[in-house]
Image (tube, rainbow, N blue to C red):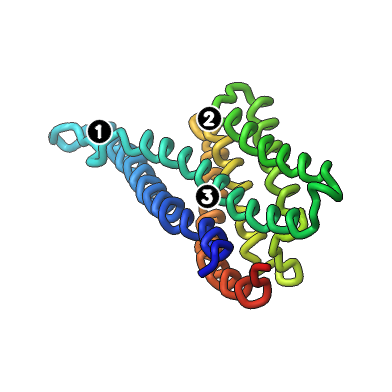
Amino acid sequence: MTTADWIRIVHPAIAVAFVYPLIGIVVHYALQTRQRRLQLAEAKAHNAEGGSGTAPKKPKLPPTVGAEHVQIGRWLTGAVVGVSLVGLAYPITKALIQSQAWSQDRFKVFFVLAMFGLTIATLACLYRAQGQLQRIAFTTLPSAGLIILGLQDGVFRRTNEWFISHYYYGIVASVLMITSLAILPEIYRSLTWRRIHIALNCLALLLFVGQGITGARDLFEIGLYMPPP
C-alpha cells in the first residue's frame, strides 16, 4: 500500500474503531431509557391502585441510564461530524493539489480552509448554545458547512445513484445528528419533540447501516477507478 492508500483508509478506520461502537452504546442506552420510562409508568399505575397490599413498585433500571444516553449521544454527534470532515478532507485536498489551486486559485484554498474551520467552530458553539435562536443558528451553520464542503471538486458523490450513495447517506446522517443534538433540550418539555428525536435517530441508524455497506463498496471502486497519481 502507498502513503495515499493509508491516508484514504483513515476515514473508514475511525468509523469502525470509534463511531460504530458509539452507535451501539447509544442504541443500548436508548432502549434502556425507554424501558425505564415504561417501568416508571407501570410503577405509577401500580402504586396508584394501591398495589394490592404489596410494597410500592420501583423501576428495575437505574435513573442514570437516561443521562448516560444523552452524554454518549453528544459524543456520537461530534464523532459523526468529525469522521465526515475527515472523509471529505482527503479528496478535496487531493483535488486542490492536482489542480495546483495554490498558484491558480488561492481564494479557493482559503475558502475551503475557512469552511472546515467554520464547521468545527459552529458545532462546538452548538454544544454550548442555550437559547432557541442560538441552537437554530448553530444547527444551520455546521450543516451548511458540511454540504458546501461536499460540493467541492474531488468528492466521490455518485449523484446519479444518490439513493445508494455513501456520500449522501453520510451528509444526511450528519445533519440528522446535529439536529438531534440541537433539539435535545426540547425533548424534556414536549412529547412531540421526543417523538421527533426518536424518529430522527431511527432514520440516522438506518443510514449508518447503509453507510457500512456503501462505504466498503465505494472504497473498493475508488481504488479501482480513482488510483492515486
Q: Residue furthest left?
A: 54
**Residue with the most extreme right position:** 104
* Sequence-wise first label, 1 or 3: 1
Which quadrant: the C terminus? bottom right
- Residue 50: quadrant of the picture: top left
Relative image position of residue 51 (x, y in whole percent): 20, 36
Residue 168 lies, in percent from the top left, at 67, 59
- What residue does disc 2 label? 185
Q: Earlier in the sequence, mark 2 or mark 3?
A: 2
Q: Secondary structure at mark 3?
A: helix
**Could you tell me how far apart the alpha carbons at marks 2 and 3 are, in whole angstroms?**
15 Å
Q: CA distance from mark 1 to mark 3?
A: 33 Å
Q: In which quadrant of the rendered view does residue 133 lie?
A: top right
Q: Identify the residue shown where x is 73% and y is 55%.
A: 97
* Three-letter amino acid code at the position of disc 3: Asn
**Which residue: 26% across, 41% down?**
61
On residue 47, the disc is 1
In front: mark 1 or mark 3? 3
